[in-house]
Amino acid sequence: MKNKYKDESALLKAIAHPMRLKIIELLLLELPTEGCSVNAIQKKLTIPQSTISQHLQILKNKGIIDGSKTGTRVCYRVIDKRAAKILKILKP
């Protein structure tokens, strides 16, 4: 029983922060594909880029998002369908 929910618990822990939920929402719903960089996220959230980068790193380490690099720009996208489903439940 202990290991059964280990992955689910890690996912919930990673997205539990309000700013990380907002980043996931932005990546899924508000930012077009070409506007999914740290700079685009920073313009929407108006918080320091370093703070956004820290949150993105947590989400990336847990396999919730992924980044594809083009030149010097990294475009982030949500790859964990469970996170997308959770956000849909929270944002009817």
Image (tube, rainbow, N blue to C red):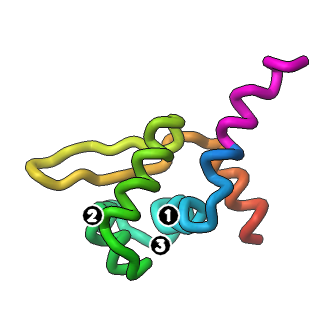
Q: Foreground mark, 3 or 1? A: 1
Is disc 1 surrounded by few (<14), some (14 to 19) or many (20+) residues within 10 Å?
Answer: many
Q: Residue 29: horizontal and vertical position, in percent?
A: 52, 67
Is disc 2 surrounded by few (<14), some (14 to 19) or many (20+) residues within 10 Å?
Answer: few
For label 2, the residue is: 34
Question: Exactly how many numbered labels are in the figure?
Answer: 3
Q: At 33% from the left edge and 79% from the top edge, which residue is drawn? A: 43
Task: Please identify the residue farthest to the right as the structure is shown.
Answer: 1
Compared to 24, does 69 lie above or below? Answer: above
Q: Which mark is residue 23?
A: 1
Say what amino acid the circle numbered 2 marks: Glu
Disc on the earlier residue, 1 or 2: 1
Q: Indicate whether residue 27 is drawn in magenta.
A: no
Q: Is residue 64 left or right of residue 40?
A: right
Q: Foreground mark, 1 or 2? A: 1
Say what amino acid the circle numbered 3 marks: Glu
For label 3, the residue is: 30
Say what amino acid the circle numbered 1 marks: Ile
Q: Is residue 12 left or right of residue 24?
A: right
The CA span between labels 1 and 2 is: 15 Å
Q: Which mark is residue 36?
A: none
Q: At 74% from the left edge and 26% from the top edge, which residue is drawn? A: 6
Is disc 3 surrounded by few (<14), some (14 to 19) or many (20+) residues within 10 Å?
Answer: some
Range shown magenta: 1-11
